[in-house]
Image (tube, rainbow, N blue to C red):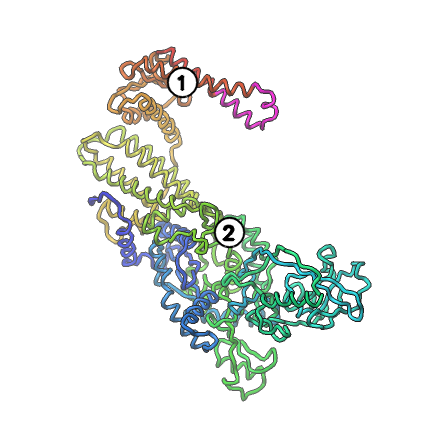
């Protein structure tokens, strides 16, 4: 064994061993004859930086991958980043704006040049930070959703789905982000409660002096009204059937229509219909063939349909329109109103419902196999409580709007050649598009200059839903060696909030392309929250810097801290003290090896009986705990598995085992015992390695010099060879309590360990004396003797059905001991009196919960038993 320093230095060890792992290519995988174990990373945004959610997610992945690697599987963890269309473009636009450049003044090619420069500058940061965490990804396989292979794969997917009838182009109501100037999906809309105003506005019935009143929170949309709607069963308005009203300010005549959608009990029972600016109004408009009047420009200002408010921002226009309505006597009243508005997840802007010509994926048919896979547990969600959420989403799936009005992303492979709605073709290349356009149009004279590629790009999720296949080039080359070997993958670790965003869509894509699931298991992590239960975020300032945490506590300390309270699917109440606990654990293990190395070894001496017993017990203890750890891993109870190894090392190995085998002061240890202790230690750090890779690799090489083929990262995971002997383990549990009883006696009477004691045991049932040598050694007992009678003049305690006696003569001052017992008897009698008083109160017994009464009766029983034992002790002195 090499000499071990007095302190563990995480910073030094982490850099050294990560470089060592990389140099020896331990993370890299190639197809071979071993069983593959594959994980694809949930790709972080290319320009992002590490946050606490990434820390948790990637630590769990690394634990799974490192364990699989040690089990002899061909572990392949594929890293990569996502181009994040909206988020990245927003950052580039912001940067250009700071430089005095407006995106609108740039061509697509010019903007893309800036975007690539931004990506090249910031794109590697988060992956480098993951290396600091210890992530054992196959970095040679690093991919990017906008690299050449992935770009071509995404376009091919679009073409395939279009040709198979899954992709179509049409006018639909979408979520429009007026700041990012693009559509966003339903899942990217965050609904927030706000304090608003409800305006009651009257519309004059055409040709009459009568008015009808409607209520709206958005008076600016009045300018886009196409009708006023009443319920056909509402007798209050039956006389208005077939009539028309005049839209205020717009002075436009629109029909009064009837539809069951209107709730007669809500508001005035009259509903203004604005098909261009409300999804429900649009559906009513389609049923009644109403005109669609869009009053807004893409940037949220009013267009020419906004009349004299053209060019004014929607919210400013709202204020001015309310004033005009009031001045013209159309405003009946306004009142405070609590409502919910949709906001863009990326920009925070209030979303506008907007009828727009976009590209969509028809989802219903694609969702069928993906729904069945999860409901039948072919793809297991962990925890399974998310199956209901998944089922609800999939059974109510809506067509997916996949076009985004951005430059940064995969440009839609559709080319337009004429003025009609259907004058377009879908193709992989412009040359292919030209041939298709000639054929479709019948115009053989078309040339490339007659074609114009769609300006929009595809939703970011349209690239990442192919991820488990595209990382192995399985879309372009579906029968290549790598995708056939690594796909399907084993585990996916991700967050519940993207269960539909990403997970469900990957399952759909897997069955569409390969008629096969993309992964076996989906481990859904919780949200990392602060001690007050708030989600950690930069805006709240409650999220610690992950790199700073690793610098303070070491990467291993932070990994352990993250996992101590992170059961699957449940939120993690993060506390920095957990990282401190992780660092302390690292120091505990380090010092355990230092203790072993401090002992002098004499190969000539025989192994003591106590050491043999200690090894017998610990071998069984390790086997028992390891079996539970394996069970925890199979059930994805990663936090429980960590806690199992933590207690096995801290309590069983360090606190018990090392004390049992420790030689006397200045004495050597025998060769057999030290060899067994090192073997146990090696097994412990093997099981700990997935959780604390840097510390364990450092210790592994501190035990003895090892070559690259013998590194811990590629050592063999322990294998259970036999079932633990429960009789030995249960017997030792009794021994622990006996030792605790003797130590309590010493502590209460200030008797130092160097002074020997005698112990007598009165057994009431057959009791093993197997571990008596251990009891004697750890308590410096002169002897352990059995007795049939009580020992007079002795301290006694009970473990199970056995009673133990420590003679007081020569050990303690008897008179002083009598006084202590008397004081304890007096205290217990006072306590018993209070309990009996409570139980003698009929009102308490009759009205208190049964559990509370039962608890008081148990207190009474325990106090009576304790008093009896103390009085017997006193009588024996």
In magenta stretch: residue 860: yes
Q: Does dot 1 land on a helix, a strand or a loop?
A: helix
| x and y percentages locating residue 572 in the rendered image | 45, 47
In the drawing, does residue 119 fall left or right of residue 223? left
Above or below 183: residue 136: above
Q: How many marks?
A: 2
| x and y percentages locating residue 238 in the rendered image | 81, 62
Quadrant containing the C terminus is top left
- Picture quadrant of residue 302: bottom right
Quadrant containing the N terminus is top left
| x and y percentages locating residue 518 in the rendered image | 48, 59
Above or below 858: residue 546: below
Taking the view exactly as shown, the residue that stands out farthest to the front is: 327
Above or below 384: residue 294: below
| x and y percentages locating residue 146 in the rendered image | 43, 69
For the question of whether residue 148 can be seen, the reply is: no
Q: Nearer the viewer, residue 117 or 317?
A: 317
Residue 824 is labelled as: 1
In the drawing, does residue 209 fall left or right of residue 672? right
Q: Earlier in the sequence, mark 1 or mark 2?
A: 2
In the drawing, does residue 443 fall left or right of residue 728? right
Q: Nearer the viewer, residue 483 or 857?
A: 857
Residues drawn in magenta: 840-861
Q: Nearer the viewer, residue 870 or 315?
A: 315
- Picture quadrant of residue 283: bottom right
Residue 380 is labelled as: 2
In magenta stretch: residue 790: no
- The prevailing secondary structure element of the residues shown in magenta is helix
């Amino acid at each position: 064994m090499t000499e071990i320093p007095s302190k563990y230095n995480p910073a030094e060890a982490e850099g050294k061993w990560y470089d060592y792992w990389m140099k020896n290519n331990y993370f890299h995988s190639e197809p071979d004859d071993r069983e593959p174990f594959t994980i694809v990373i949930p790709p972080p945004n290319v320009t992002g930086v590490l946050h606490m959610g990434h820390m948790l997610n990637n630590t769990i992945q690394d634990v799974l991958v490192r364990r699989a690697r040690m089990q002899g599987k061909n572990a392949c963890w594929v890293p990569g980043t996502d181009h994040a269309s909206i988020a990245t473009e927003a950052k580039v636009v912001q940067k250009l704006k700071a430089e005095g450049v407006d995106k609108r003044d740039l061509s697509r090619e010019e903007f893309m040049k800036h975007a690539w420069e931004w990506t090249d500058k910031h794109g590697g940061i988060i992956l480098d930070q993951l290396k600091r965490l210890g992530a054992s990804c196959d970095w040679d396989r690093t991919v990017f959703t906008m690299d050449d292979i992935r770009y071509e794969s995404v376009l091919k997917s679009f073409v395939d789905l279009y040709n198979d009838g899954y992709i179509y182009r049409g006018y639909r109501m979408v979520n429009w982000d007026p700041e990012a100037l693009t559509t966003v999906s339903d899942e990217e809309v965050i609904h927030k409660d706000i304090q608003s105003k409800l305006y009651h506005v009257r519309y004059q019935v055409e040709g009459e002096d009568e008015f009808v009143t409607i209520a709206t929170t958005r008076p600016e949309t009045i300018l886009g009204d196409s009708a006023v709607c009443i319920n056909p069963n509402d007798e209050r308005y039956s006389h208005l059937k077939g009539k028309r009203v005049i839209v205020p300010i717009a002075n436009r005549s629109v029909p009064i229509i009837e539809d069951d959608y209107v709730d007669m009990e809500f508001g005035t029972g009259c509903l203004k219909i604005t098909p261009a600016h409300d999804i429900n109004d649009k559906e009513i408009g389609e049923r009644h063939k109403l005109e669609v009047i869009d009053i807004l420009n893409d940037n949220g200002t009013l267009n020419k349909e906004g009349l004299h408010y053209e060019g004014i921002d929607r919210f400013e226009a709202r204020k001015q329109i309310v004033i005009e309505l009031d001045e013209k006597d159309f405003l009946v009243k306004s009142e405070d109103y609590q409502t919910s508005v949709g906001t863009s997840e990326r920009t925070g802007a209030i979303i506008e419902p907007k009828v727009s010509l976009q590209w969509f994926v028809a989802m219903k048919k694609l969702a069928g196999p993906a729904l069945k896979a999860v409901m039948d547990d072919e793809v297991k969600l962990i925890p399974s409580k998310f199956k209901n959420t998944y089922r609800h989403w999939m059974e109510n799936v809506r067509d997916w709007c996949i076009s985004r009005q951005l430059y940064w992303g995969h440009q839609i492979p559709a080319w337009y050649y004429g003025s009609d709605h259907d004058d377009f073709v879908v193709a992989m290349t412009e040359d292919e598009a030209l041939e298709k356009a000639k054929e479709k149009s019948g115009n053989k004279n078309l040339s490339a200059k007659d074609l114009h590629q769609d300006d929009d790009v595809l939703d970011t999720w349209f690239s990442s839903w192919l991820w488990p296949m595209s990382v192995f080039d399985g879309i372009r080359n579906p029968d290549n060696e790598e995708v056939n070997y690594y796909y399907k993958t084993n585990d996916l670790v991700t967050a519940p909030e993207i269960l539909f965003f990403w997970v469900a869509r990957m399952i759909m894509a897997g069955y569409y392309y390969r008629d096969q699931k993309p992964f076996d298991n989906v481990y859904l992590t919780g949200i990392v929250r602060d001690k007050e239960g708030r989600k950690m975020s930069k805006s709240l300032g409650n999220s610690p810097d992950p790199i700073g945490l690793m610098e303070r506590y070491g990467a291993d300390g932070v990994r352990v801290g993250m996992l101590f309270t992170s059961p699957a699917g449940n939120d993690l109440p993060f506390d920095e003290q957990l990282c401190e606990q992780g660092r302390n654990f690292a120091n505990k293990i380090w010092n355990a090896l230092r203790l072993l190395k401090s002992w002098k070894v004499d190969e000539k001496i025989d192994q003591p009986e106590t050491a043999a017993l200690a090894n017998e017990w610990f071998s069984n203890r390790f086997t028992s705990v390891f079996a539970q750890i394996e069970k925890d891993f199979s059930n994805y109870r990663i936090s429980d598995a960590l806690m199992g190894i933590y207690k096995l090392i801290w309590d069983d190995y360090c606190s018990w085992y090392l004390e049992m085998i420790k030689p006397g002061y200045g004495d050597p240890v025998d060769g057999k015992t030290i060899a067994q202790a090192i073997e146990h230690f090696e097994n412990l750090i093997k099981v700990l390695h997935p959780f604390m890779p840097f510390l364990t690799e450092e210790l592994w090489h501190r035990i003895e010099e090892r070559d690259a083929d013998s590194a811990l990262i590629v050592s063999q995971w322990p294998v259970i060879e036999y079932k633990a002997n429960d009789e030995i383990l249960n017997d030792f549990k009794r021994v622990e309590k006996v030792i605790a009883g003797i130590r309590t006696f010493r502590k209460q009477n200030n008797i130092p360990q160097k002074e020997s004691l005698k112990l007598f045991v009165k057994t009431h049932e057959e009791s093993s004396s197997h571990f008596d040598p251990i009891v004697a050694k750890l308590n410096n007992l002169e002897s352990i003797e059995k007795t049939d009678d009580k020992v007079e003049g002795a301290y006694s305690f009970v473990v199970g059905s056995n009673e133990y006696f420590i003679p007081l003569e020569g050990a303690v001052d008897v008179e002083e001991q009598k006084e202590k017992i008397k004081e304890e008897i007096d205290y217990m009698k006072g306590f018993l009196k209070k309990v009996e008083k409570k139980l003698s109160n009929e009102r308490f017994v009759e009205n208190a919960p049964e559990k509370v009464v039962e608890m008081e009766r148990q207190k009474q029983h325990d106090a009576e038993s304790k008093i009896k034992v103390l009085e017997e002790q006193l009588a024996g002195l």
